[in-house]
Amino acid sequence: MTDHTSLLGSLNLFESLSSEELATLSARLEEVHFPAGTAIFEQGAPGGRLFIIEEGAVDISYGTGKDALGLATLVPGEYFGELSLFDGEPRSATARAARDCKLLALDHIDFVAFTSKRPDAALKIMRELARRLRQTNAAFSSQVSRNVLKEEAEQLTLGQRVADKVASFGGSWIFIGSFGAAMAVWMTINSLLNEAFDPYPFILLNLMLSTLAALQAPVIMMSQNRQGVKEKLLAENDYQVNLKSELGIQALIKGQAELIARVGLLERQVTPSRRPGAVSVPGEGA
């Protein structure tokens, strides 16, 4: 029988076990083969086995048919199906051999038998899961969201600030009211004066309005272009935040489920018996 102790020891789930514990657990592994394209297990199928990839690659997906969502592609040295190893519940995803695979399978019954005889090993696995959960919490709590509008505002040039002010004022009721009042005063004065400086049809006023429109249009376009840049920055920031939230929540839920399963397993194996020499877990039974 091939010794897979070194492979088990390289997995973060079992890396805290001693050489003797790894050797004992390695003896319970079963070598299985799956041709490329073969389903190792389907979502919703009965569970009860952990698989370690020794050769080949495995695609993990969620859902069925055309709606299936690819989650990951695992390579040699990685494992999957660990949740059902502890609780025997139906599979939460589908695993399919991307290439010809040589896998090592560990059954739920064999693992329970191993941990029932070695509760210290179960505690080591729990400590490893707790460590991974803390790392997930730390990564999840690190800040990704930024005030991109404030960062962008701090980098504005004088011309960009002027363009924003002009666009903001030019699109307000204050501008419309004041501009309308100025035009009314201009036309009234030049209609009543005997020697008007801009008599009807107010050619000078028309020239001023044309010049103002010609200057105002590109300034407003400059401001609108910057609004488009702001929207892109906000969309990118929202995507980064949503992506991290999704990945963090998935990892957190998975880690919590693994930890709860292992705690329940340990309680069933150690707590009821209270046999002499049993390991006392601080806070046990709380």
Image: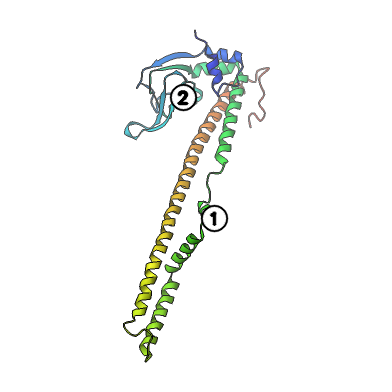
Q: Earlier in the sequence, mark 2 or mark 1?
A: 2
Dot 2: what SS? loop
128 vs 99, left or right, is: right
Relative placement, left or right, of 96 versus 117 is left
Identify which amino acid the numbered label 2 is placed on: Gly
Verify CB contact (< 8 Å) between mark 2 and mark 1.
no
Is residue 274 shown to the viewer in this render? yes
Q: Which residue is identified by label 1?
A: 154
The relative height of residue 228 versus residue 265 in the rendered view (above or below) is: below
Q: Residue at x 66, y 19 (%)?
A: 278
Give the residue at mark 2: 81
Q: In the displayed structure, would residue 244 be above or below residue 184?
A: above
**Is 150 situated above or below 137?**
below
Q: Is residue 90 visible?
A: no
**Quarter of the rendering containing residue 126:** top right
Which residue sits at x=54%, y=27%? 261
Q: Amino acid at mark 1?
A: Glu
Give the Cα separation between the discs numbered 2 and 1: 50 Å
Q: Which picture quadrant has residue 5?
A: top right
